[in-house]
Amino acid sequence: MKTAENNIIGTDLIKQMMKDRAIRTSITKDSFLYFFHFYYAHYVQYPTADFQKEIIHYLEKSPKEHFYVCAFRGSGKSTMVTTAYPIWAILGKQQKKFVMIFTQTRIQAKQHMMNIRTELEGNKMLLNDLGPFQEESDEWGSYSLVFKKHGARITVASSEQSIRGARHNQHRPDLFICDDVEDVQSTKTREGRNKTYNWLRGEVIPAGDKNTRLIIVGNLLHEDSLLMRIRGEVETEQTSGTFKMYPLIDSNDECIWKGKYPDEKALEEEKKKVANENAWQREYLLRIIPDDDQVIYPKWIQYYDELPGDRHKGYRGTYAGVDLAISAKDSADDTAVVFAHVYSRCEKMRIYILPNPIAKKINFPEQVDLMKDIRNTQMTKRSDELFVESVAYQEALPQMLEHHGIKATAIKPKGDKRTRLALTSTAIKSGIIKFPRQGCEQLIEQLVGFGVEKHDDLADAFSLLINATMEKHTKEGTILMFFLGGDDDSTVYYSDYVDVE
């Protein structure tokens, strides 16, 4: 036995447990804390931290309550949750019969099963108390350990596999554990994030029953990752369970695992092992740090709760930016329309983006009908204006709209998409542009994920709208543009609007 676990189990009690099977099984059956620090003592290289005791507490407190854990790399979360807890869930008081553990890939699943099997084979006392077991490969291509004495099974599978109809004897899965089912690459696009979320909701959860427990453990990879979506659902009571986040450094700038990292020197030594600052911030401090080429940062987005209203003395009109798609095929881009109310001009200008922008696949006649509908229902004032991108065949749409008596200004885009979006950055950061609290989630995702997200149609419509609006309302003034180094070492495009007498 290692000495580090003695902050949990006293030496005299350990000796009794070593000698008497009845004592150790009685104690460890009721307490996962004691189970872990006895059978898995060789993992306890440092004094157990309070956050680790808290994780163990939530694991053992209920056989049914869902539990979601986002913790820093090296925190021991996978050892506790995925390696030790499934064994205790069967052997201990929760009496689980069919545990399913999910990883991201089949290779990871196979490796994880090998780790569990190796642990059992090498841990003679645990094997004698739990065993015997046998390994199986089932019809899903997943890997299982069967414990006949307990009528139980542990199966490890990947998120690539279907588990519909999974059963062990008469038991449907009664414990799901998802361990790092996402990575940085899979969370880069909304499509990838949706795929994981839909797999959980459409494949995993329906395979259980009403008393099946769900546990998800991982790192913070993206503000819209699986764990962060679930965090939002827990906070709004859309889903049940407990969500816990454990960064290595807490909000008081204190290390939460002093036993392993007693001082700044120890933290610096750990930081040197990490590839770069972004990885340290993301994997240890649980902060999402954008890539160096990010155009719009999430922290820049400012929100409003109510519009000033069209009777506001500075109200200048409703404007819309239209980014046209050439095809209505599934693989094509969307036709996107972003709306805004504009107030005042020059340095007092404020642009309020309206909720529920349009993004859908439609053909040319449908585009004409859509613009007519927008003009007739949402842009009824004389000062209102449609800004339509004018490239190639798209030049025909403003002409067609003029034929129908609808004023639309054709805008020839200047520069590439990134440059056009970058020109809006200072207006976003300074609060000239404000977004609704709800209703623009997809637009904001495209703005902050530009260059990574699969679609950027709303972002294009947004930059067209903003740049055209600013140009329009500086005709009575002049626009001064220059470049500044941002506080995050990125390039900030700064615009200052000055009245000219």
Image: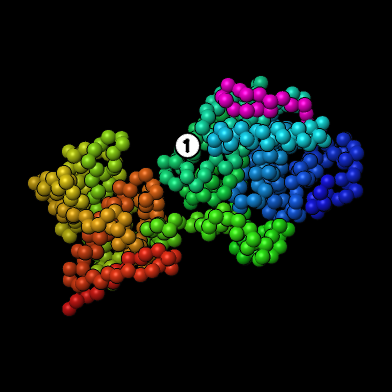
Q: Position of residue 97 (x, y in %)?
A: 69, 29
Q: At x 32% / y 66%, what residue is drawn?
A: 493
Residue furthest to the bottom: 501
The question of residue 14 being in magenta is answered with: no
At mark 1, the secondary structure is helix
Q: Residue furthest left?
A: 403
Q: Which residue is mark 1?
A: 198
Q: How is the image coloured?
A: rainbow
User: Residue 84 at what x, y percent from top left?
Assistant: 71, 40
Viewer-proximal residue, 198 or 162? 162
Q: Residue at x 20, y 51 (%)?
A: 389
Residue 191 lies in quadrant: top left
Instruction: Please tell me in which quadrant of the rendered image residue 156 appears.
Output: top right
As shown in the figure, which amino acid type bears the numbered disc 1?
A: Asn
Question: Does residue 340 appear anywhere in the picture?
Answer: no
**Highlighted range, magenta:** 129-145
* Residue 184 percent location from the top left of the image: 50, 47
Quadrant housing the C terminus: bottom left
* Residue 48 percent location from the top left of the image: 74, 53
- Using the image as rendered, state which of residue 472 and residue 482 is in the foreground: 482
Please say if 470 is above or below 445.
below
Is residue 20 visible in this depiction of the protein? yes
